[in-house]
Image (spheres, rainbow, N blue to C red):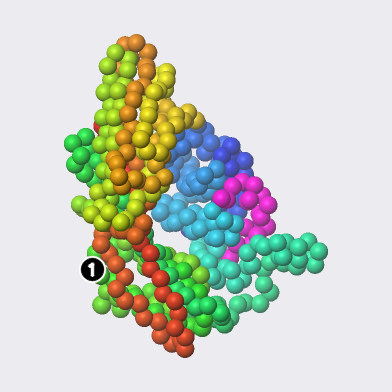
């Protein structure tokens, strides 16, 4: 049961309030903000907060917070999943840079979406294509029509796709240029110890499809090493029985961009990048020497958007750091007991190994309470750590030959290096 929803900004102001059961007073928001203030960092706040009478379940995206209160037995992941789906729909309608101003400007449209997505406290219509067929996304033309013609973004008649066996795809789709593209994206979550050994490694992969095909195409996708796809989360369009039997992905796609499947790989994995850090503290001075480089065998592949974040205690007085690649900046964190040095490299060079070296100055006799843990970000295009590749792509039940495209990329998720 999904009883209510409060959409808040970072200061606790209620932007949208919706109840599907008995109304909950707004004082629960004050109780939630009190719990937030007890933590120095936002990430330290538990998604489920227990109070004497209620459980407060929340999800944060930037400065937007979705809060739901429950007073009976309810699976927290059920509530969090609805929160995530609501945010995905809002991203699709209003763009990824959604904030409190966007919500205030489109609160009527968001109320319409919530009415369709949740009915009586249970998920009802959550597919983006179905929602778009019923509620038009905001455009300049729609806003002008709503202002001068007193028109509504909600359609009066039920869309035809709602009455078919394939409700996720609207009928009568036509394109002048037919194409279907797949993005095979993998994120590496790992912890690298001081001796360069990987203690924890997990890969989260996803196949994202962008479909612009006319008619009602039927697609069969085959991949290399299908046994690698474990703990798979499939889109509702995938024929699950055939996938279990043949490990083949067969589906009638929705129109537009959607995540076809998500999978998880646990255990040893090949890393595209190495990081060798060394920070030694002596007499109030920290000597820094950090090097990064590519571990990929194919030197034609590039690693871009590399960023190494080194946290230092707030007692740091100054820093004298230089690098032979990229740029170095010192960032004051809004909260937390440290300052951060950001080393940014737009693209790893192939003719040299990037090195960050220098010193940081502390008060005399200062001893750091603990050794820092580095966070690393990167994006390796045309390469993936699992070796999973698209081997075949067949499109049937159409009279044209569409363009087919496949891209692969590996990026850092929670990628940390201990000192």
Q: Is residue 158 above or below residue 56?
A: below
Secondary structure, magenta segment, majority class? helix
- Residue 257: percent from left, percent from top: 48, 67
- Residue 221: percent from left, percent from top: 34, 75
Q: Residue at x 60, y 72 (%)?
A: 133
Q: Which of 203 and 362 lies nearest the eye of the viewer?
A: 362
Q: Residue at x 29, y 33 (%)?
A: 290
Q: What's the magenta region?
A: 97-116
373 in magenta = no
Q: Which of 185 and 48 lies nearest the eye of the viewer?
A: 185
Q: Is residue 250 left or right of residue 69?
A: left
Q: Residue furthest right?
A: 148
Q: Which picture quadrant has residue 145?
A: bottom right
98 in magenta = yes
Q: Residue furthest front?
A: 351
Q: Using the rendered image of the protein, determine whether residue 180 is visible from the camera's viewpoint.
A: yes
Name the residue beneath numbered marker 1.
225
Task: Name the quarter where the C terminus is drawn.
Answer: top left
Q: Residue at x 40, y 82 (%)?
A: 395
Q: Is residue 349 above or below residue 83?
A: above
- Residue 228: percent from left, percent from top: 24, 64
Q: Is residue 220 above or below residue 314?
A: below
Q: Which of 234 and 274 lies nearest the eye of the viewer?
A: 274
- Residue 282: percent from left, percent from top: 27, 16
Mark 1 Cα shell of 10 Å, populated few (<14), some (14-19), many (≥20): some
Q: Residue at x 55, y 78 (%)?
A: 175
Q: Using the rendered image of the protein, determine whether residue 67 is visible from the camera's viewpoint.
A: no
Q: Which of 74 and 396 lies nearest the eye of the viewer?
A: 396
């Amino acid at each position: 049961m999904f009883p209510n929803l409060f959409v808040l900004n970072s200061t606790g102001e209620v932007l949208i309030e919706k109840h599907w059961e008995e109304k909950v007073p707004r004082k629960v928001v004050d109780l939630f903000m009190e719990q937030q203030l007890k933590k120095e960092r936002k990430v330290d706040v538990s998604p489920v907060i227990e109070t004497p009478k209620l459980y407060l379940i929340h999800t944060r995206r930037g400065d937007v917070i979705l809060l739901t209160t429950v007073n009976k037995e309810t699976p927290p992941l059920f509530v969090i999943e609805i929160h995530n789906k609501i945010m995905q729909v809002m991203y699709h309608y209003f763009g990824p840079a959604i904030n409190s101003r966007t919500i205030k400007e489109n609160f009527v449209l968001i109320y319409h979406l919530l009415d369709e997505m949740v009915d009586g406290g249970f998920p009802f219509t959550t597919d983006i294509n179905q929602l778009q067929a019923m509620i038009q996304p905001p455009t300049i033309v729609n806003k002008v029509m709503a202002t001068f013609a007193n028109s509504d973004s909600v359609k009066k008649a039920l869309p035809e796709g709602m009455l078919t066996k394939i409700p996720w795809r609207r009928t009568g789709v036509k394109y002048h240029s037919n194409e279907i593209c797949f993005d095979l994206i993998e994120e590496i979550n790992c912890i690298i110890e001081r001796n360069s050994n990987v203690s924890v490694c997990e890969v989260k992969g996803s196949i994202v499809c962008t479909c612009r095909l006319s008619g009602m195409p039927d697609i069969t996708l085959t991949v290399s090493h299908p046994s690698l796809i474990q703990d798979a989360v499939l889109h509702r369009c995938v024929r699950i029985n055939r996938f279990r039997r043949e490990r083949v992905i067969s589906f009638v796609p929705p129109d537009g961009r959607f995540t076809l499947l998500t999978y998880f790989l646990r255990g040893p994995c090949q890393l595209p990048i190495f990081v060798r850090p060394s920070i030694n503290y002596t007499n109030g001075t920290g000597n820094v020497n950090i090097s990064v480089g590519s571990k990929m065998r194919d030197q034609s592949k590039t690693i871009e958007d590399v960023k190494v974040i080194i946290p230092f205690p707030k007692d740091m007085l100054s820093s004298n750091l230089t690098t032979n690649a990229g740029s170095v900046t010192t960032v004051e964190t809004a909260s937390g007991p440290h300052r951060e040095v950001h080393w940014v490299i737009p693209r790893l060079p192939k003719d040299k190994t990037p090195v960050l070296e220098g010193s940081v100055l502390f008060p005399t006799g200062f001893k750091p309470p603990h050794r820092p843990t580095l966070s690393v970000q990167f994006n390796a295009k045309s390469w993936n750590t699992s070796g999973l590749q698209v081997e075949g792509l067949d499109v049937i039940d159409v009279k044209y030959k569409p363009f087919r495209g496949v891209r692969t990329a590996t990026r850092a998720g929670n990628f940390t290096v201990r000192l």
